[in-house]
Amino acid sequence: MTEQAKVRHKFRMKFPRLVKLIDEAVQARGWSDKAASRNAGLNEEAVRSIKRGHEPSPKTLMALAKTLDIEESVLFGSLAADDPQASSAVTPDHPPLYNGTLKSGFIEVGNEEYASLPRFDAKLSAGPGSLMEQDPEPLGYHLVEAQWLKAITSTIPKNLIIVMVDGYSMEPTFYSGDWVLVDTTQRRVSDQAIFALRVAEVMWIKRLQPMLSLQKIRMISDNERYYPEDLDEHQLQIIGRVVGLVARRI
């Protein structure tokens, strides 16, 4: 391996999962890195910059996700998996102490605007934090920077929830203990995407794909050890679409 190739390899190893996702999508379209960047409305060096080890901004990831037809949550999740310290994309600064009563919505803390979002736990079947209840009561509320949230989604806080992932079926996209952002206004499965849902008395974070010819919905695990399952629409209750990764334990 030449010295130049060694340098390229070193840079690519900083975000291997993220670079692999982008590379596969770019190559599938027959584009160059510069073309992919331009098509996403970015500086033509944007993709190469990521490969050189520069952490992309949330807006850059969202632009690439849209252009390359990759789930935003998958790109954000791959960045977090590559570099748990990557703060600008997936982990907003921890807000200062807030002494007021929290509920869903935007609030001001000092001179900064934050969004207060309810937290739930996918493994709980009843009580506070469970999404199985008729009127679910959250475990509590999590504050995130409003600017960060608005870069992820245009949905208002009262229609967003944060859910802790339980289990290993969605690895390597999501890991047990991850906190994901769910948009409860997006409940229609019109294309393949990741959703929070209930099947019988079990809560899942799963990738769903409409099977129009079978009039079924396919429930897919990103972990290849788990087999997909085809369900009738009435068998599942969709809570909302996963639109981002909020936090990951390191």
Image (spheres, helix red, strand yellow):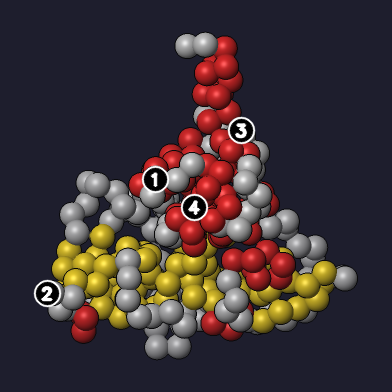
Q: Label 3: how many residues lie within 10 Å, few (<14), some (14-19) or many (20+)?
A: some
Q: Marks 2 and 1, how far apart in space?
A: 32 Å
Q: Label 1: how many residues lie within 10 Å, few (<14), some (14-19) or many (20+)?
A: few
Disc assigned to residue 149: none
Task: Judge whether 15 appears above or below 71 on screen.
Answer: above
Q: Nearer the viewer, residue 90 or 57?
A: 57
Q: Is residue 120 visible?
A: no
Mark 2 vs 3, N-terminal side: 3
Please name the residue that numbered disc 4 is placed on: 75
Residue 62 position by quadrant: bottom right
- SS assignment at label 4: helix
Query: Residue 112 location, x and y as percent?
Result: 82, 69
> Looking at numbered disc 3 in the image, what kind of residue is underneath it?
Arg
Mark 2 vs 4, N-terminal side: 4
- SS assignment at label 3: loop
Disc assigned to residue 214: 2
Q: Marks 2 and 4, how far apart in space?
A: 30 Å
Please name the residue that numbered disc 3 is placed on: 52
Task: Judge whether 13 appears above or below 207 on screen.
Answer: above
Q: Marks 3 and 1: CB-CB under 8 Å? A: no
State the residue at coordinates (16%, 68%): 230
Mark 4 or 3: the one toward you:
3
